[in-house]
Image: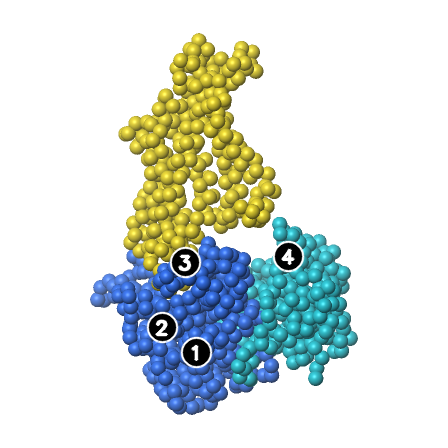
Chain colours: A cyan, B yellow, C blue
């Protein structure tokens, strides 16, 4: 099998606060193959965002540790700040959730795209302009030449997210990390933006990590998925497998608690209790207090990650077996 | 109380050197103001205790200094230590009472203007704008010049110009609280306007007050000192720190530095302490004020 | 069945601030411009006793404005809001109080819908005491603890402040507060959209249980179509301040007729299998509510639009047993 373009093993990120140590991410491993879309799904506080920020040295005030943090042949953990900055602009781009605050209101769209081109490429003025027009039409903005001169406030949320995608693509990155890119958007616009993103990934041999809380989005767009809960990866595998036959009780509960389109359910399944607070995590399995299958061992020991067939990995002593 | 000592706020406070240092200065100043008169050797307001022949004695560590006047004496033979302690009482009294009055008036007008909106809001805020467009020193100078000096008059005058800052901040805070869903909920639950104003809006706009309050005290002490220095502040019989600086100013260049400089240093130290604490509070409680 | 709430031809406009420089010079002289946002444009619907009616639409379609106009948080420009057949005037305090007790609201954001300076017992108990629903302090507390139990909170939590609770628990407190008035209609404005996925199911189940127990009718404002499909009996789909289609839930989800509804449904990210609706690429974005398009508001994005759509707005017509559609071309395929 091909070597993954991005690989993370046993990543932990901790924050020291006055309430004590917060384990935002504890021992998470995942990898991204070339040309695929990896979904990282979890609820608030699951550590899905922090894990990815840790990769890019964007965690403020946190301590990041990992056995392996590798992009192609580069060891990310040993990179100096300067080198990381270069990598962030040119090889790995990020798209954030809020299209309203990610753009500087004082500069034109053209200025903001050109800025990253100037910084990370050797193109001259003319070439930059051609590239910008090319980019804007690629993300579905009509009449790109005149649009370059407009300001962010002249655009709606969906259009701004397209521009942010254009900026992320400007330097032709190998990997895009998109953090809830469509959460602030309406359903119809969300569908447009997701289609745009998947097309851009699949047609141009890039790879993407899509961070989201929406299992519908995951199922619709991703190839593989990692399910996170309270700072740990509970389950990972090919998206279809995970969605159709969840093996971890958390994934199973989560999937069953969402209203299904094709059935008329009287009552939704509900996971009891609530997510544990980050500074007060259970000693054993983090899902144990809410788990219907919990046994005494789950309370005292953290379940190891088990490798199953078809690239599936599960952190559970008593996974759900089919049939 | 236990909750306070376990809070993040207190944790950060303990770790901030400048905040603790500032509070120590403020605490000492308050203690000196409260029990000082019982400790210092002289009551400078009592002419029987002073002797003109002791005028302009230097501090005790200078050659001609005497141990009974540790910080020397002024032109009327009053013990400098005693006048500074008594003067600081007046400065603190004015600083605190002006701030309390401005705060109460300003908060009420601000919350009312913000909540009512429309014409009420425009009227109150335009009055505030007009006040702000004059330097507050100038207004105070005029009023004091017309009505004469006196501690009560000074307090009223400074409060009259001091409420604006409170009103503006509280109004801004009210405008954002007004749109919170819990205020909408209060309307839907059918509460009266006054109840919503006092029970639901007011308690939620007070966070910036503590920051404003601290800064204002320092500010007022300085304004009072300036006015007194200009001769329109406190009466000569009850000298505040500012007036003490003025009294010594005439002889400052004849080598009698302590008469002016010592009370001046005390003002500086006091306001410095207040500002240290104020800055910490601002960073902690109101990051958006920066 | 009795209609508990009837909204007739509701129109809501927000005036935009017009400055002193906002004027227009024309042949007839100088006139002031009074820009407005047309938030709700002639909306009518009714809710029957014991039913869940959902207003669905994308942001800015006016669904929340309808809710706020019903509970008189904002003024309507014209139209009628009838509760059990009567209109409540804001002037008559008694009838207004009666109205308030009958119609309560659950808010979207559990982090801003509770007063942070009040203890839970005061948040839930204040309306009970204020409206003298119970005569004395002890009986108020008694009711508070009953309500807390009903929404799944233990009554030891009474002395705590909102920040000590999670999002889901706060939403339960908000629900208990609404129930304290013993209302017959609850307006739920996106009650689960701010909550985590695993908590949404808890709150939706709770709402359905309470609906049966207290014999409530519910007006649900939502954008999540899976949630709407699960919880509602009838739905109305809004676009730019108008209802474009309404009717029984099963009927509309089985056969959406309005081009907008069809586009909306085809965009739903569905977890299992594929989306059953024909894929429709919806073009462009919603026009501004400051300058509404002519004719049918959807014509700027509609693949079926023709001259008639640009010229005249289609009426909402009953095409089949309480299934209303506002479109000239509802029978056409794409």
**Residue placed under numbered mark 1 in the picture:** C52
Where on the picture, by quarter, is residue C36?
bottom left
SS of the residue under disc 1: strand
Work out how far the residue at label 2 is from the one at label 4, CA to CA, in angstroms: 46 Å
Where residue C331 appears, x then y in whole percent? 42, 90
Where on the picture, by quarter, is residue B20?
top right
The dot on residue A279 is 4
> Dot 2: few (<14), some (14–19), or many (≥20) neighbours within 10 Å?
many
Towards the viewer: A255 or B157 = A255
Q: Quadrant of the C terminus of chain A?
A: bottom right
Please, which chain is the residue tagged with disc 2 on? C
Going by the picture, which residue comes out furthest to the left? C28
**Residue placed under numbered mark 3 in the picture:** C137
Q: Are marks 2 and 4 on the same chain?
A: no
Q: Residue at x 45, y 63 (%)?
A: C142
SS of the residue under disc 3: helix
Q: How many marks?
A: 4
Work out how far the residue at label 2 is from the one at label 3, CA to CA, in angstroms: 43 Å
Please, which chain is the residue tagged with disc 4 on? A
Q: Are marks 1 and 2 on the same chain?
A: yes
Residues at discs 2 and 4 in contact (Cβ within 8 Å): no
Q: Residue at x 47, y 86 (%)?
A: C250
Please, which chain is the residue tagged with disc 3 on? C
- Mark 3 or mark 4, whichever is nearer to me: 3
Work out how far the residue at label 1 is from the one at label 4, CA to CA, in angstroms: 40 Å
Residues at discs 2 and 3 in contact (Cβ within 8 Å): no
Q: Quadrant of the N terminus of chain A?
A: bottom right
- Mark 2 or mark 3, whichever is nearer to me: 3
SS of the residue under disc 4: loop
**Residue placed under numbered mark 2 in the picture:** C40
SS of the residue under disc 2: strand
């Amino acid at each position: 099998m091909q070597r993954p373009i991005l690989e993370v093993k046993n990543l932990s990120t901790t924050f020291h606060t006055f309430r004590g140590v917060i384990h935002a991410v504890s021992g998470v491993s995942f990898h991204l193959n070339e040309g695929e879309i990896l979904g990282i799904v979890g609820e608030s506080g699951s550590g899905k965002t922090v894990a990815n920020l840790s990769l890019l040295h964007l965690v403020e005030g946190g301590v990041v540790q990992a056995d392996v943090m590798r992009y192609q042949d580069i060891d990310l953990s040993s990179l100096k700040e300067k080198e990381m900055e270069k990598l962030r602009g040119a090889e790995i781009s990020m798209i954030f959730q809020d299209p309203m605050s990610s753009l500087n209101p004082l500069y034109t769209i053209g200025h903001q795209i050109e800025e990253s081109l100037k910084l990370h490429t050797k193109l001259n003025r003319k070439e930059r302009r051609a590239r910008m027009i090319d980019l804007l039409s690629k993300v579905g903005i009509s009449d790109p030449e005149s649009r370059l001169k407009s300001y962010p406030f002249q655009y709606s949320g969906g259009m701004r997210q397209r521009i942010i995608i254009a900026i992320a693509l400007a330097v032709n990155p190998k990997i895009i990390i998109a953090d809830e890119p469509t959460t602030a958007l309406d359903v119809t616009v969300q569908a447009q933006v997701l289609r745009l993103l998947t097309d851009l990934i699949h047609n141009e041999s890039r790879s993407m990590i899509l961070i989201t809380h929406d299992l519908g989005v995951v199922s619709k767009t991703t190839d593989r998925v990692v399910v996170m809960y309270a700072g740990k990866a509970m389950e990972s595998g090919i998206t279809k497998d995970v969605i159709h036959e969840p093996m971890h009780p958390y994934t199973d509960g989560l999937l069953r608690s969402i209203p299904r389109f094709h059935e008329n359910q009287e009552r939704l399944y509900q996971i009891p209790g609530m997510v544990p607070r980050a500074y007060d995590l259970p000693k054993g399995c983090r899902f144990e207090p809410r788990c219907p299958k919990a046994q005494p061992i789950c309370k005292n020991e953290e379940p190891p990650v088990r490798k199953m067939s078809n690239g599936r990995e599960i952190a559970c002593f008593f996974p759900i077996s089919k049939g | 109380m236990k909750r306070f000592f376990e809070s993040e706020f207190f944790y950060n406070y303990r770790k901030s050197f400048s905040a603790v240092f500032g509070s120590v200065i403020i605490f000492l100043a308050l203690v000196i103001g409260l029990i000082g008169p019982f400790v210092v050797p002289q009551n400078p307001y009592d002419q029987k205790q002073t002797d003109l022949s002791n005028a302009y004695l230097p501090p005790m560590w200078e050659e001609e200094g005497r141990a009974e006047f540790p910080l020397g004496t002024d032109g009327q033979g009053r013990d400098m230590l005693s006048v500074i302690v008594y003067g600081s009482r007046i400065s603190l009294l004015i600083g605190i009472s002006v701030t309390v009055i401005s705060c109460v008036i300003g908060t009420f007008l601000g919350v009312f203007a913000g909540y009512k909106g429309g014409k009420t809001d425009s009227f109150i805020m335009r009055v505030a704008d007009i006040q702000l467009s004059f330097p507050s020193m100038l207004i105070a100078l005029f009023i004091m010049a017309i009505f004469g000096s006196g501690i009560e008059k000074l307090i009223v005058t400074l409060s009259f110009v001091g409420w604006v800052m409170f009103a503006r901040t509280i109004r801004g805070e009210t405008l954002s609280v007004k749109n919170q869903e819990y205020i909408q909920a209060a309307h839907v639950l059918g509460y009266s306007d006054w109840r919503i104003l006092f029970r639901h809006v007011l308690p939620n706009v007070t966070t910036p007050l503590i920051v404003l309050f601290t800064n204002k005290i320092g500010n007022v002490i300085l304004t009072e000192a300036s006015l007194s220095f200009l001769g329109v502040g406190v009466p000569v019989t009850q000298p505040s720190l500012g007036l003490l600086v003025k009294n010594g100013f005439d002889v400052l260049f004849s080598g009698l530095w302590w008469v002016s400089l010592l009370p001046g240093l005390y003002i500086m130290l006091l306001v410095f302490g207040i500002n240290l604490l104020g800055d910490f509070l601002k960073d902690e409680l109101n990051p958006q004020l920066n | 069945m009795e209609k508990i709430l009837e909204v007739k031809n509701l129109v809501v406009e927000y005036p935009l601030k017009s400055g002193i420089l906002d004027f227009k010079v024309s042949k007839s002289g100088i006139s002031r411009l009074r820009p407005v946002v047309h938030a709700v444009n002639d909306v009518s619907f009714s809710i029957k006793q014991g039913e869940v009616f959902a207003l669905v639409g994308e942001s800015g379609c006016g669904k929340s404005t309808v809710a706020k106009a019903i509970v008189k948080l904002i003024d309507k420009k014209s139209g009628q809001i009838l509760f059990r057949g009567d209109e409540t005037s804001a002037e008559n305090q008694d009838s207004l109080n009666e109205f308030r007790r009958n119609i309560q609201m659950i808010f979207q954001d559990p982090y801003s819908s509770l007063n942070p300076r009040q203890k839970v017992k005061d948040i839930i108990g204040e309306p009970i005491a204020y409206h003298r629903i119970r005569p004395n302090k002890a009986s108020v507390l008694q009711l508070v603890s009953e309500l807390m139990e009903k929404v799944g909170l233990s009554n030891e939590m009474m002395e705590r402040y909102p920040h000590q609770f999670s999002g889901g628990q706060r939403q339960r407190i908000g629900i208990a507060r609404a129930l304290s008035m013993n209302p017959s209609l609850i307006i739920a404005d996106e009650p689960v959209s701010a909550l985590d996925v695993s908590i949404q199911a808890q709150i939706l189940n709770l709402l359905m249980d309470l609906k049966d127990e207290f014999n409530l009718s519910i007006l649900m404002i939502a954008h999540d179509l899976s949630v709407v499909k699960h919880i509602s009996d009838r739905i109305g789909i809004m676009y730019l301040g108008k209802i474009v289609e309404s009717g029984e839930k099963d009927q509309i989800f089985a056969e959406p007729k309005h081009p907008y509804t069809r586009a909306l449904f085809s965009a739903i990210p569905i977890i299992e299998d594929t989306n059953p609706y024909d894929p429709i690429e919806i073009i462009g974005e919603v026009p501004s509510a400051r300058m509404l398009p002519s004719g049918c508001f959807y014509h700027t994005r509609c693949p079926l639009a023709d001259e008639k759509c640009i010229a005249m707005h289609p009426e909402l017509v009953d095409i089949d047993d309480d299934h209303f559609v506002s479109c000239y071309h509802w029978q056409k395929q794409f």
